[in-house]
Image: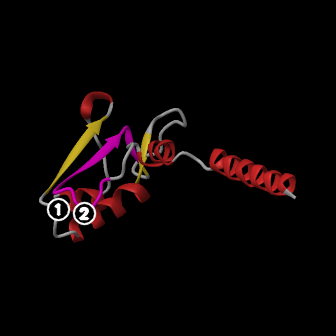
Amino acid sequence: MADKNTEKKGKSEEITKNEEESKPNDGVQNIKELGVLNVASGDDSIQILPIIGQIEGHNMGSPQTKVTKYEHVIPQLVAMERDEKVKGILVILNTVGGDVEAGLAIAEMIN
């Protein structure tokens, strides 16, 4: 009887370990999707908005060009604007030559 309990416990620990290994790493996923390791929490009074490469949707670039997607930037800006705790936004431009072309939607929101 003790062997069955030990066997069940061993299997459940193995399943839990396999489930943890199969979960995607949140930090890696944030870097791939948003270009940042940690998404800013609402407790931060100064938010950081990295713009890496071109902003996708303004001009069509080559597939090898690094872009920041509109659908990632605009929701972050809206959330920052609505949060009363946010006192300022630091926009980090990481582009070739430091030039950023953006559509009117993003330009108006940053202004």
Query: For the residues marked 2 and 1, what is the alpha-carbon distance in whole angstroms?
Result: 6 Å
Please tell me whether residue 6 belongs to the stretch shown in magenta: no
Nearer to us in this view, 15 or 10: 10
* Residues tagged 2 and 1 counted as in contact (Cβ below 8 A): yes
Magenta residue span: 40-55
Q: Residue furthest front?
A: 2
Scheme of image coloration: secondary structure
Q: Amino acid at mark 2?
A: Met
> What residue do we see at 36% from left, 63% from top?
75
Q: Position of residue 8 (x, y in %)?
A: 80, 56
> What residue do we see at 65% from left, 44% from top?
21
Please tell me whether residue 45 belongs to the stretch shown in magenta: yes
> What residue do we see at 22% from left, 60% from top?
43
The numbered dot on residue 80 is 2
Residue on which the image places disc 1:
86
Quadrant in which the N terminus is drawn: bottom right
Q: Amino acid at mark 1?
A: Val
Q: Residues within 10 Å of mark 2 (few under 14, many from 20)?
A: many
